[in-house]
């Protein structure tokens, strides 16, 4: 449980309240600090997977904890961003946040059901790309204000739309994979019974 990769996942979860607190303020300085902490937490996602594979510290807990930490930080920050009012500027559309939360909830529930069947469903490669795009989107949306000629809100919405499309597709793939695994198990059990 207390391997370095798992500790990095716990760190991502522990940093969520700090980012949420900073997002209760709508000034640019608080937004930048929240964005930097979010970026730091997001970078640990790469390192926990890399370290787990490199040092043979892959565990069933890590397979569940890693994607759970990703989901918690993305969902929590997106809900805060959708609720924020930054000087009358554009907000993160609630319908987009509902799609993200719905997808993440469906996949998490599916993983829970799979565990009751003795199946551990690891994060897929497409899920990693989805998290990367979501992390870029959320970072830009936290920054929100234009800097150095870059309108971070527009960049964030673009990446969030792209990440949501990939998330919905990968969610469908998770469900298909789960039902195929159940069918294979049922056919193997049926053959053994005969």
Image (spheres, helix red, strand yellow):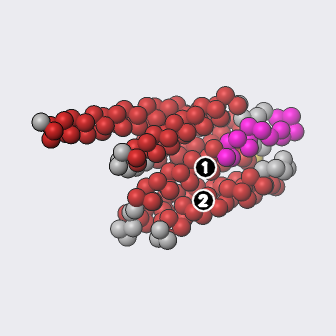
State the residue in front, 191 or 28: 191
Mark 1–mark 2 contact, CB under 8 Å? Answer: yes
Residue 5 in the image, given as x and y percentages of width and height: 48, 65
Q: Residues within 10 Å of mark 1 (few under 14, many from 20)?
A: some
Residue 78, above or below 96: below
Residue 64 visible in rendering: yes
On screen, residue 84 versus residue 110, left or right, reads right
Residue under label 2, please give it: 12
Residues at marks 1 and 2, CA–CA distance in whole angstroms = 9 Å
On screen, residue 173 versus residue 46, left or right, reads left
Residue 135 in the image, given as x and y percentages of width and height: 59, 47
* Quadrant in which residue 63 is drawn: bottom left
Residue at the extreme left = 194
* Quadrant in which residue 193 is drawn: top left
Residue at the extreme top = 95
State the residue in front, 177 or 89: 177
State the residue in front, 61 or 54: 61
The local secondary structure at tag 1 comes to: helix
Residue 10, above or below 97: below
The local secondary structure at tag 2 comes to: helix
Query: Which quarter of the figure is the C terminus placed in?
Result: top left
Q: Residue at x 54, y 40 (%)?
A: 104
Residue 110 in the image, given as x and y percentages of width and height: 45, 40
Q: Residue at x 63, y 56 (%)?
A: 39
Residue 119 in the image, given as x and y percentages of width and height: 35, 47
On screen, residue 181 versus residue 104, left or right, reads left
Q: Earlier in the sequence, mark 1 or mark 2?
A: 2
Which mark is on residue 72? Answer: 1
Q: Residue at x 72, y 57 (%)?
A: 17
Q: Which residues are magenta?
A: 76-89
Q: Is residue 111 magenta?
A: no
């Amino acid at each position: 449980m207390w391997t370095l990769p798992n500790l990095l996942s716990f760190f991502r979860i522990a940093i969520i309240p700090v980012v949420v607190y900073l997002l209760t303020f709508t000034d640019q300085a608080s937004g930048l600090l929240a964005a930097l902490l979010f970026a730091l937490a997001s970078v640990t996602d790469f390192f926990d997977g890399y370290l787990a594979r490199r040092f043979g510290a892959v565990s069933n807990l890590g397979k569940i904890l890693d994607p759970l930490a990703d989901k918690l930080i993305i969902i929590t920050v997106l809900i805060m961003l959708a609720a924020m009012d930054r000087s009358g500027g554009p907000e993160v559309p609630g319908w987009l946040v509902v799609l993200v939360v719905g997808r993440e909830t469906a996949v998490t529930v599916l993983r829970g059901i799979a565990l009751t069947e003795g199946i551990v469903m690891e994060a897929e490669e497409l899920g990693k790309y989805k998290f990367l795009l979501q992390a870029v989107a959320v970072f830009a949306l936290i920054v929100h204000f234009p800097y150095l000629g870059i309108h971070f809100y527009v960049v964030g919405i673009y990446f969030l739309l792209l990440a949501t499309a990939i998330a919905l597709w990968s969610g469908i793939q998770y469900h298909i994979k789960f039902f195929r695994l159940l069918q294979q198990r049922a056919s193997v059990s049926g053959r053994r019974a005969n």
